[in-house]
Amino acid sequence: MATVEITAEQKKTLLTLFELIKAEGEEAPAASASVNPEDPNWRPMLGRRCVIRTYSAGVHIGDVTWINRENAMECKLDNAYRLWKWEDGGLSLSAIANNGVVKARVNFTNEVMLTNAIEYIPINDVAFETLMPWVEDKELPTKK
């Protein structure tokens, strides 16, 4: 079984993800200085619709379809949206993931690869639907 050494920053990110799992009442994998990238439990947000906060690329929402096996700070979203700004409904991204927004600026990006993902927050269906009236570009332009 192969293991991958991770940095202190990456360990902190993983511990944050594990705390989210525990908050949902699920069993979190044991945190250690190394993880087994073959173990699906160490990527608990894979396959879920999440709000992703990145270090420098802003806030994105979409279906997590890939997470880098070596560091979990790179991911791919499908059915993706970029959240430019929001008003009311939530002071934090966690509140947006739970309660949605009252007003926002959102654009549809369809597919996006993100680096420096520092927070993965599962978003519920009701909260996600509050974003839809604010999507400024409902469809991608067709190629000519």
Image (cartoon, rainbow, N blue to C red):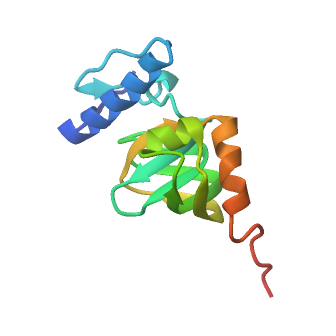
- Give the quarter of the image for residue 132: bottom right
Task: Using residue 31 as the reference point, say whether residue 119 is left or right of it.
Answer: right
Can you name the residue that lies furthest to the left here? 8
Vertical placement of residue 144 versus 14, above or below: below
Say which residue appears at 73% left-offset and 58% top-offset.
Answer: 133
Asked if residue 137 is positioned above or below residue 127 in the image, the reply reads: below
Q: Nearer the viewer, residue 134 or 117?
A: 134
70 lies left or right of 109: left
Of the 4 image quadrants, the one containing the C terminus is bottom right
- Which residue reaches farthest bottom? 144
Q: Is residue 94 above or below residue 134?
A: above
Place of residue 7 in the rendered image (x, y in percent of width and height, measured from the top left): 21, 39
Residue 68 in view = no
Residue 72 picture quarter = top left
Residue found 51% across the figure and 25% down from its top: 40
Residue 80: image location, x then y, percent: 63, 56
Q: Please name whichever residue, 7 or 95, is drawn nearer the observer in this view of the structure.
A: 95
All told, the count of numbered labels is 0
Q: Residue at x 33, y 56 (%)?
A: 55
* Residue occupying the point 34% across, 31% down: 16
Rendered location of residue 67, percent (x, y): 49, 43
- Give the quadrant of residue 13: top left
Residue 114 % position (x, y): 47, 57
